[in-house]
Image (cartoon, rainbow, N blue to C red):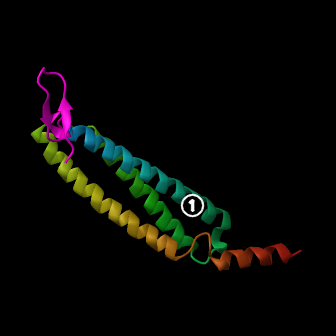
Amino acid sequence: MTIIWQTTHPIMKPIKNAWQMKAMDANRYATKKTIAQGMLDIALLTANASQLKYILQVGEQHQFYKLMLILISLSIVLQLLVGILFVAIGSLNINKQQDQTAAVILNDVILVVVFIISVVNVIISGFGIEYSSQPLRLLDQHEKTP
């Protein structure tokens, strides 16, 4: 246990924990959490944009072109939806009872959508966008043709 000494009074009294000095602001915590989640969403969105660029460059030569195009597009659309929901939940003040209910519902919706995004991206990774040998072999054959 950390003891913090209070020096504002002539008689120094130990304060048993730091929470007595400053109460935790749940609204500020939730805002920071939302910002951190948004940054992770931007990182995944960037990765999906790179995968989309790759699949469009390779084109229908890729063994799973249509499937990858649909999955990557779905992932990007769902991430944009989550981004909009982050903005909505970030604007709520959870210190108000009315906003707490809305925040809980939005948080649950975001959780489900993020789970779906994760599953979609696992499937995308399973089909190996960058490491698929099929498109590379087709490109090699294309270069040998006069």
Label 1 Cα neighbours within 10 Å, binned few <14 / some 14-19 / many ≥20: many
* Position of 114 relative to 29 (above/below): below
Residue named by callout 1: 52
Quadrant the C terminus occupies: bottom right
- Is residue 92 at all visible to an observer of this figure? no
Residue 4 vs residue 50: left or right?
left
Residue at 23 percent of width and 57 percent of height: 108
Residue 141 vs residue 37: left or right?
right
Question: For this rendering, which residue is in front, 90 or 25?
Answer: 25
* Position of 127 relative to 49 (above/below): below
Residue 133 vs residue 117: left or right?
right
Question: For this rendering, which residue is in front, 4 or 141?
Answer: 4
Where is residue 41 drawn, in percent x and y? 42, 53
Where is residue 33 drawn, in percent x and y? 31, 47
> Magenta segment: does it hold 95?
no
Residue at 85 percent of width and 76 percent of height: 144
Residue at 66 percent of width and 79 percent of height: 134
Residue reaching furthest to the right: 146
Q: Amino acid at mark 1?
A: Leu
- Find residue 8 and report its image quarter: top left
Question: For this rendering, which residue is in front, 49 or 43?
Answer: 43
Residue 41 vs residue 51: left or right?
left
- Find residue 91 and report its image quarter: top left
Residues in magenta, as a range? 1-23
Question: For this rendering, which residue is in front, 98 or 8?
Answer: 8
* Position of 132 relative to 71 (above/below): below
Where is residue 100 drawn, in percent x and y? 15, 44
Residue at 64 percent of width and 72 percent of height: 60
> Magenta segment: does it hold 13?
yes
